[in-house]
Image: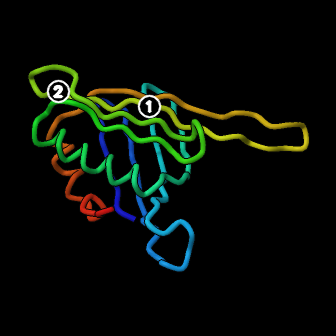
Amino acid sequence: MSVLKFDNSGSYFEMSVAIADDPLVQNCGDAYITIDALSDGFKGHNDLWVLGEAFSAFCAALISLEHSLKGEATLESISPNELKLRIFSVNNRGHLAVEGSTGYWSQSQEGSFWHSVSFGFSFEPQQLTKAISAPWMRIKD
């Protein structure tokens, strides 16, 4: 898995991606994603699936954002609320930020409990330039 990473002042967001590429499986083309985030002391981890079409659109939007430093790239998981991610321009001087949330239901004998973390911070545009060099950024529909 290759990693997309943004960080600033001790906060970080990491997203590892593996594309399902076996044509014999139903989820061929979908992205298996691992999220690790630490934002102002709050930390979270999650593993989840994203539809291939949504992931391709996210990659295209990231490339566009890197070139223009305007707009945003958003991504959501297949399962509701497991991932909501937004990478966006915060002003007309090229400053960027990442924000989102990730969570999952934890089951036990006593019941089920929702575990989640929200994150958000700004980062240097050079980090996006490095991020779009990941091999999965060139995935086509």
- Residue 79 image offset from top left, x and y in percent: 60, 45
Q: Which residue is mark 1?
A: 100
- Residue 139 image offset from top left, x and y in percent: 29, 63
The residue lying at 28 percent from left, 29 percent from top is 97
Looking at the image, tell me whether mark 2 or mark 1 is earlier in sequence order: 2
Q: Residue furthest right?
A: 109
Decide which of 53, 123 is in the foreground and name it: 53
Q: Which mark is residue 92?
A: none
The mark tally for this picture is 2
Q: Residues within 10 Å of mark 2 (few under 14, many from 20)?
A: some
Q: Residues within 10 Å of mark 1 (few under 14, many from 20)?
A: some
Q: Which quadrant would residue 88 be assigned to in this image?
A: top left
- Under tag 2, what secondary structure? loop
Coloring scheme used: rainbow
- Residue 94 image offset from top left, x and y in percent: 12, 28
- Looking at numbered disc 2 in the image, what kind of residue is underneath it? His
Q: Is residue 66 left or right of residue 52?
A: left
Which quadrant: the C terminus?
bottom left
Q: Is residue 45 left or right of residue 119?
A: right
Q: Which residue is mark 2?
A: 95
Which quadrant: the N terminus?
bottom left
The residue lying at 57 percent from left, 69 percent from top is 26
Decide which of 68, 24 is in the foreground and name it: 24
Decide which of 39, 68 is in the foreground and name it: 68
Gap in Å between the C-alphas at discs 2 and 1? Answer: 17 Å
- Under tag 1, what secondary structure? strand
- Looking at numbered disc 1 in the image, what kind of residue is underneath it? Gly
Q: Is residue 21 left or right of residue 115?
A: left
The residue lying at 27 percent from left, 27 percent from top is 122
